[in-house]
């Protein structure tokens, strides 16, 4: 009897485990299959993709029979975007500085905002915090026309500086929220102690809070980097012909058709454009999860 | 070195009065303990001295000078916080040196001072560690080091020992007292623990609901409590309060026994547990009180003996080894000279 009970429980445990693993495998496949399709397609030649003679039985998930990086080279330096046929290469040089500036500025301002909103009391502080929170939920589409007008007044229309401004303005709601919620976990007594020790507003921030902000800074940077790098709407709306970010260029590359659609080049282009975010996640993903869970001061 | 004076200090949060008319002063080098149940406004008052919180009315004076308008850093006051509030990213040495760094003292001079303080507090071996890697007692010492290094006019302590275990608390209590004797700096020390108050203070302010119930030396507070709150809050086991009716000849208790303490009207007779002495069995001289022994609790050096006396429960403290039995009717000599009479209605000492 007893032995039966034990083995029964053993079987149930195994089943539960098998079920768990099964679900996880399916979830992983849902992400990996499209990626595999993209990778395979980008490594194939056009005849192989379109199922011309010799490749009739091919599907989108058949591994490339003769892998070639030709499409990657094409997307990198030769594909036509609007009228210029120089590939995506040149757009890295303009997009990376724009994204870097926007991320750095929005994260820095968010950190200061979070510090002020969590550690200093002033008139209407809760109202301001509420408005910040509300700002996170404003859909992009609503603000397009007002932003266009503001950029025009600032003489920043169609410039990378204008895009930086837009991304910072939109991003500080999120970064403020991140830092504010992180800094409320730092005991107020630490700030009081520093005030008594003679530290002022900036000394407290720079010498005491910033050094413990690593985890949340990583979260904010990754969040901002991904959303700004992947942004298409603001780039397309405000960049114009002179300040075209990579994502807009990618879209144009895909839509600039000369004859048949070059799926392999499109796929290669999409993967090239996605590489920086992938690198960021691989390098910092571990800290991202840790940062989301972290309080500032370990007891 | 400084005198400290509270002049009609009041504080409200919105419509709630958290501190009401705090008005007393202490001399240079005194050890003032603010004691009272949690929520009575002790930390708020400490924050006002420190300049971390504002006051609504009145003023605080150090050496006769009002300090209301001064920033915390301009007051030359150091504070040890309940949670220690160490700077998490800094080493122990940098924690202690932080105030000196803010003053712009050169690094070599800073480190020399840090070494002196660390030696005084026996934490020299911890100087390179981060707060995370310290035990509670060690953090406590670092927090004290951070205050000591500044050599301020006044030290403030907000329940500094409440996060330590019992043994360590007693050790640190002694150590802080020694430190005070050695430095002679004025200290304001907040606690809810009446034993800490009694053992450390040169002056005690007993607080309740934002009001100072009594201000005095530990002895005054213990022997002559100003009201029944102070009487029962200070001392353990707490002072017994026996209801009775007083006249010029003495107090008649509920069971008809009389204590020779003159007074008037309905009163509570305050008697400390150690003011009772059991008499030899069968002996019952004039003035002795008869009581039934209800419970006996040995504690080591003392035994706590619960009596039924004068229609009330009475707790007494007797030396260990006292010959006494549960259930017996026994005569007790009571130190009526020391007894304190309180108005039964208002609880105020007569
Ligand atoms: N910022 C605040 N706003 C409103 N009420 C407060 C604030 N700070 C403290 N209080 C109230 O003031 C009273 C005294 O608090 P505190 O000084 O911390 O008491 P203690 O240190 O004696 O335990 C408490 O009732 C507390 O709720
Ligand atoms: Mg308190």
Image (cartoon, coloured by chain):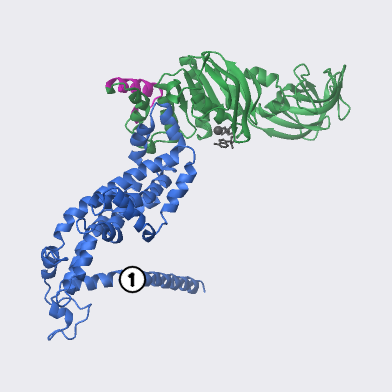
Chain colours: A blue, B green
Q: Is residue B89 above or below residue B214?
A: below
Residue B237 in the figure: left or right of residue B51: right
Say left or right for A271 vs B122: left
Q: Please give the residue where the numbered disc 1 appears in the rendered image.
A: A25
Tag 1 subunit:
A
Looking at the picture, tell me which residue is in the foreground, A59 or A136. A136
The image quadrant of residue B151 is top left
Identify the residue shown where x is 89% and y is 27%. Answer: B256
Magenta residues span B108-126
Q: Main structural element of the magenta stretch: helix, strand or loop?
A: helix
Q: Position of residue A297 (x, y in %)?
A: 40, 41
Examine the structure image and report whether residue B112 is included in the region drawn in magenta: yes
Q: What residue do we see at 60% from left, 36% from top?
A: B14
Q: For this rendering, which residue is in front, A258 or A75?
A: A258
Q: Is residue B321 visible?
A: no
Image spot of residue B236 (x, y percent): 66, 29
Residue B156 visible in the shown view: yes
Q: Ligand 2: give its quadrant.
A: top right
């Amino acid at each position: 009897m007893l032995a039966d009970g034990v083995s029964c429980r053993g079987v149930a445990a195994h089943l539960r485990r098998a079920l768990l693993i099964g679900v996880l495998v399916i979830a992983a496949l849902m992400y990996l299959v499209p990626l595999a399709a993209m990778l395979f397609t980008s490594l194939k030649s056009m005849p192989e993709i379109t199922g011309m003679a010799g490749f009739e039985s091919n599907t989108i998930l058949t591994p490339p029979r003769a892998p070639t990086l030709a499409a990657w080279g094409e997307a990198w330096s030769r594909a036509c975007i609007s009228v210029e046929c120089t590939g995506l290469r040149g757009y890295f040089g303009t997009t990376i500085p724009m994204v870097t500036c926007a991320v750095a500025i929005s994260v820095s301002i968010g950190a200061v905002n979070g510090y002020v909103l969590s550690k200093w009391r002033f008139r209407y502080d809760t109202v301001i915090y509420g408005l910040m929170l509300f700002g996170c939920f404003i859909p992009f589409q609503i603000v397009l026309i007002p932003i266009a007008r503001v950029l025009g007044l600032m003489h920043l229309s169609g410039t990378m500086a204008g895009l930086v401004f837009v991304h910072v303005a939109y991003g500080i709601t999120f970064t403020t929220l991140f830092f504010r919620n992180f800094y409320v976990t730092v005991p107020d007594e630490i700030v009081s102690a520093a005030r008594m020790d003679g530290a002022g507003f900036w000394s407290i921030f720079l010498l005491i809070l910033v050094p413990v902000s690593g985890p949340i800074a990583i979260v904010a940077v990754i969040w901002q980097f991904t959303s700004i790098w992947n942004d298409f709407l603001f780039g397309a709306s405000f960049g114009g012909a002179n300040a075209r970010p990579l994502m807009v260029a990618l879209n144009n590359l895909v839509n600039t058709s000369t004859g048949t659609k070059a799926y392999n080049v499109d796929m290669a282009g999409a993967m090239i454009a996605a590489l920086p975010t992938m690198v960021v996640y691989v390098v910092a993903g571990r800290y991202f999860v840790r940062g989301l869970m972290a309080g500032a001061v370990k007891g | 070195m400084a005198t400290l004076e509270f002049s009609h200090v009041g504080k409200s949060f919105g419509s709630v009065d958290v501190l009401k008319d705090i008005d007393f002063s202490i001399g240079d080098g005194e050890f003032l303990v603010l004691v009272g149940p949690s929520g009575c406004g002790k930390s708020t008052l400490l924050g006002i001295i420190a300049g971390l919180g504002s006051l609504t009315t009145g003023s605080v004076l150090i050496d006769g000078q009002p300090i209301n308008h001064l920033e915390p850093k301009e007051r030359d006051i150091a504070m040890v916080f309940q949670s220690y509030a160490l700077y998490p990213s800094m080493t122990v040495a940098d924690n202690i040196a932080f105030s000196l760094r803010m003053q712009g003292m050169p690094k070599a001079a800073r480190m020399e001072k840090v070494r002196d303080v660390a030696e005084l507090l026996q934490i020299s071996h911890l100087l390179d560690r981060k707060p995370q890697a310290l035990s509670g007692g060690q953090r406590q010492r670092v927090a004290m080091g951070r205050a000591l290094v500044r050599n301020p006019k006044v030290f403030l302590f907000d329940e500094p020992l409440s996060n330590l275990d019992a043994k360590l608390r007693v050790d640190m209590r002694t150590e802080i007292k020694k430190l005070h004797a050695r430095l002679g700096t004025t200290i304001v020390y907040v606690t809810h623990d009446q034993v800490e108050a009694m053992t450390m203070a040169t002056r005690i302010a007993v607080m309740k609901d934002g009001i100072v119930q009594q201000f005095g030396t530990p002895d005054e507070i213990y022997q002559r409590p100003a009201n029944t709150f102070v009487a029962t809050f200070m001392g353990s086991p707490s002072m017994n309060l026996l209801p009775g009716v007083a006249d010029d000849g003495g107090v008649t208790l509920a069971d008809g026994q009389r204590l020779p303490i003159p007074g008037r009207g309905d009163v509570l007779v305050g008697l400390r547990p150690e003011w009772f002495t059991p008499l030899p069995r069968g002996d019952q001289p004039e003035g002795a009180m008869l009581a039934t022994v209800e419970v006996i609790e040995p504690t080591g050096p003392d035994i706590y003996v619960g009596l039924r006396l004068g229609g009330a429960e009475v707790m007494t403290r007797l030396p260990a080894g006292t010959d006494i039995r549960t259930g017996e009717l026994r005569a007790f000599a009571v130190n009526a000279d020391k007894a304190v009479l309180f108005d039964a209605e208002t609880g105020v000492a007569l």
